[in-house]
Image (cartoon, rainbow, N blue to C red):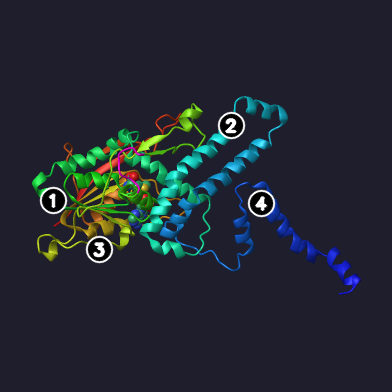
Amino acid sequence: MSFSDLRFIIASDVLLACLFPLAILFLGYKHVPSFSFSELKDLLLLGRRKTRHYGHFSLERAHESYTQYVRLSEQELSLMRRSYSTLGRANKNIGYKIGYPRKLDRMKDVTDLNATITDGVAELAIEEFPSLKTKDPVAAGSADLGRVRESLKHFVRDWSEEGAAERTRIFAPILDLLRSVDPQERGGLKVLVPGCGLGRLAWEISQLGYDTTANELSFFMTLSLRFLLSPKTTTTPNEHILRPYAHWFSHQRTNDSLFRGISFPDAVPRLSPTFRLVEEDFMKLKAPSSNRNDAYMDGYDFIVTLFFIDTSLDLLSTLNHIHTLLRPGGVWINLGPLLWTGGAQAKVELSLEEVLQAAEEIGFVLDRDEEGPSAQRTIECEYTGDRNAMMRWIYKAEFWVARKSK
Ligand SMILES: C[S@@+](CC[C@H](N)C(=O)[O-])C[C@H]1O[C@@H](n2cnc3c(N)ncnc32)[C@H](O)[C@@H]1O
């Protein structure tokens, strides 16, 4: 190569094009503290190990997201630090005096404390699903961090004393109805709880003596539930502590409240022949065979949907499937709001009267009792609310009972 060629290359865009991405990587490495050398290496070697797109709620993505909880949280924290650093000198001084940088440090400490749970969830997942050891890399991002945090809040809603009041309001109508069945008969009756989340309602139903199947599609939920179900990770009540509200600074009266720890679980659940977990899309479930040696009676005796039906993008298929999975005369119990996924993603977004009409079209007979445990009614309730917060989101959820005609 001649000297003039070299001069041309140095002066040309070619060199710039080569150096620019390297400079960006270098700056990223220098200025984003959570950006580790190994990640830099991974980025440079991107072509060799391609990240694979696993489903949003898949085992692989959920596992990676729990594993990456600290890194993803620190990424967010470093953005918050950067915003703070753009304050002018005088305002930064006020921030310093009221302890804002310390609050950000505290968030980092709390993230590390929460990581004892998220790491525990991820490690147990590896033991229970060894295939995870050889999974392709997953590019977990902020939406995945949101899903991990949502599951952490469900530890409170489902499995802490702190969540008991919220739970009792919504579980009571369902459990009261199921308690009205003679205890001697319950053992022979099959109950399905689709979209069970962290499974407390399903577990409570199993404790009443019913043969209960908890079903959940999202491994973000079930890996956390498994953390409670396994004697390797959970053995005694309230042995774990979580700071579930630390990541959302809004509506907090004090920092102690924001960072407060919540113990869980208030009860230790275990799987058993009468409390099963099925990690699958509800729409793929088949009706169980009848206990009565009568194929005509195949199906569940009860299907209980709690804050579930409106998560469907295809409500009518979901209602049809509930109907299909029930035995003739089987009962559908619903409690929840109608918070449809917007942006034309849901095939239909119905009002309450339309949902009930559709259910009747499908073949359900709605219980029209005006009183008693099966009476249709509105239940004011919260969903993973923080009882110390300066804001409450109240649902006027609807409870109804419907029967599949014989
Ligand atoms: C709003 S959450 C309610 C969770 C739980 N029922 C509760 O009240 O805490 C809805 C749940 O349904 C699950 N879900 C949505 N579609 C599902 C499907 N097709 N099969 C199984 N679970 C599903 C979601 O993953 C989510 O955990």
- Within 10 Å of the Cα at label 4, are there few (<14), some (14-19), or many (20+) other Cα atoms? some
For the residues bearing labels 2 and 1, Cβ distance under 8 angstroms: no
Seen in the image, is 98 located left or right of residue 204?
right
* Mark 3 or 2: the one toward you: 2
C-alpha separation, residue under disc 4 versus residue under disc 2: 24 Å
SS assignment for the magenta stretch, majority = loop
In the rendering, which numbered label is found on residue 286? Answer: 3
Seen in the image, is 130 located left or right of residue 47?
left
Residue type indicated by callout 1: Gly
Between discs 2 and 1, the one toward the N terminus: 2
Q: Residue at x 68, y 27 (%)?
A: 93
In the rendering, which numbered label is found on residue 267? Answer: none
C-alpha separation, residue under disc 3 versus residue under disc 1: 21 Å
Between discs 3 and 1, the one toward the N terminus: 1
Query: Which element carries disc 4, helix, strand or loop?
Result: helix
Residue type indicated by callout 4: Tyr
The question of residue 270 being in magenta is answered with no
- Can you identify the residue that label 2 sits on? 102
Query: Which element carries disc 3, helix, strand or loop?
Result: loop
Between discs 3 and 2, the one toward the N terminus: 2
- Within 10 Å of the Cα at label 2, are there few (<14), some (14-19), or many (20+) other Cα atoms? few
Pointer 3 residue Cβ closer than 8 Å to ligand 1? no
Considering depth in this image, is 154 or 232 the residue closer to the camera?
232
C-alpha separation, residue under disc 4 versus residue under disc 1: 60 Å
C-alpha separation, residue under disc 3 versus residue under disc 2: 54 Å
Q: What is the span of residues highlighted in magenta in the rendered image?
A: 233-239
In the rendering, which numbered label is found on residue 29? Answer: 4
Considering depth in this image, is 270 or 11 the residue closer to the camera?
270
Query: Which element carries disc 2, helix, strand or loop?
Result: helix
